[in-house]
Image (cartoon, rainbow, N blue to C red):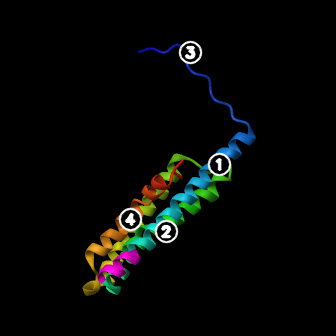
């Protein structure tokens, strides 16, 4: 398929106010997502503790924290870079994403190594999954934008 130059869509031009409004909306969405993940981490920890005791609560907290901490740092980095011109590009995003996933694996490995005989595996996995699916809380409340 050949596209003539006449068929190409025109570039969208945004004013400074439009760009600021888009940055603010993206920042609010990012903050909401991290807060929802934090709420899910607390819920998983409290429920695991109520159902299976303190070892399960600590395991759920460790599983949730293994993803929540690197993700929060990545979100903070994205928020800070959003307000600096020229700093946001796909390479830095994917590099940050790789760092986040690597840190998650490292924290999970450290949790397994340090907690050897004390880990309640279902609680750890549920804590991790609850944080990974924090956006479900936003969907349920209608705050996902």
Q: Which residues are magenta?
A: 45-52
Q: Residues within 10 Å of mark 1 (few under 14, many from 20)?
A: some
> Which marked residue is nearer to the observer: mark 3 or mark 4?
4
Q: Residues within 10 Å of mark 3 (few under 14, many from 20)?
A: few
Question: What is the distance, in whole Å, between disc 1 and disc 4 at their CAs?
Answer: 28 Å
Q: Residue at x 41, y 65 (%)?
A: 131
> Which marked residue is nearer to the observer: mark 1 or mark 4?
4
Q: Which mark is residue 5?
A: 3
* Secondary element at tag 4: helix
Q: Earlier in the sequence, mark 3 or mark 4?
A: 3
Q: Which mark is residue 23?
A: 1
Q: Position of residue 95 (x, y in %)?
A: 47, 56
Q: Residue at x 51, y 50 (%)?
A: 144
> Which marked residue is nearer to the observer: mark 1 or mark 2?
2
Question: What is the distance, in whole Å, between disc 2 and disc 3 at their CAs?
Answer: 49 Å
Q: Position of residue 89 (x, y in %)?
A: 56, 47
State if disc 2 and disc 1 touch (CB < 8 Å).
no
Q: Which mark is residue 38?
A: 2
| Residue on which disc 4 sits | 130
The vertical placement of 68 against 30, above or below, is: below
């Amino acid at each position: 398929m050949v596209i003539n130059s006449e068929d190409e869509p025109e570039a969208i031009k945004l004013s400074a106010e439009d760009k600021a409004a888009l940055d603010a909306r993206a920042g609010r969405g990012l903050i909401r997502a991290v807060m929802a993940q934090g709420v899910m981490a607390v819920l998983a920890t409290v429920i695991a503790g109520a159902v299976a005791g303190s070892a399960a609560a600590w395991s759920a907290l460790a599983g949730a924290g293994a993803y929540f901490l690197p993700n929060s740092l990545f979100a903070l980095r994205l928020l800070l870079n959003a307000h600096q011109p020229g700093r946001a590009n796909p390479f830095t995003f994917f590099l940050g994403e790789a760092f986040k996933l690597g840190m998650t694996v490292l924290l999970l490995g450290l949790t397994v190594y340090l907690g050897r005989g004390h880990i309640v595996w279902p609680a750890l996995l549920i804590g991790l999954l609850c944080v990974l699916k924090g956006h479900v809380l936003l969907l349920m409340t209608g705050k996902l934008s």
